[in-house]
Amino acid sequence: MSLYLMYGKYQTGTMQDISSERTEKAKQVIEENGGTLKAGYAVLGRSDLLFIVDFPDIADVVKTSLTMKDMFGISFSTNGAMTIEEFDKLF
């Protein structure tokens, strides 16, 4: 599994649909595509959401991102990540 940071931005008109039910549906989409939601945050700045997720590979992340955009009207920008401990082992 690989760690990814998914930064979400609400599209026009999608904020009124914020609910715990939609959050649960997003978790289901992540799991149905082979991922695990490690943490989720509402954030300030360029993004509205930050999901920290584990996925087997990048294709699963892309599929999840596109599915959630279609379902919820939230666009995602995604970055791969590793822990500092993993990073330190590279050197």
Image: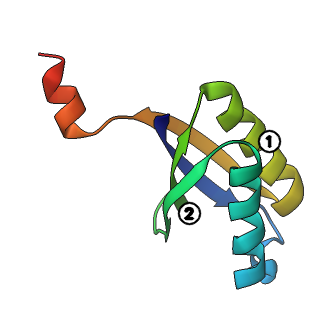
Crowdedness near tag 2: few (<14), some (14–19) or many (≥20) residues, C-alpha within 10 Å:
some
Number of numbered discs present?
2
Residue 88 percent coordinates (x, y):
13, 27
17 in relation to 61, above or below: below
SS label for mark 2: strand
State the colouring used for the structure image: rainbow
Task: Tell me the residue at 27%/39% (across/down).
Answer: 83
Q: Is residue 19 visible to us here?
A: no
Task: Tell me the residue at 17%/36% (across/down).
Answer: 85
SS label for mark 1: helix
Q: Amino acid at mark 2?
A: Leu
27 in relation to 3, above or below: below
- Relative to 44, 12 lies left or right: right
67 in relation to 9, above or below: above
- Relative to 71, 20 lies left or right: left
Residue 29 percent coordinates (x, y):
76, 55
Q: Which mark is residue 66?
A: 1
Residue 77 percent coordinates (x, y):
60, 42
Nearer the observer, 88 or 17: 88
Q: Which residue is mark 2?
A: 49
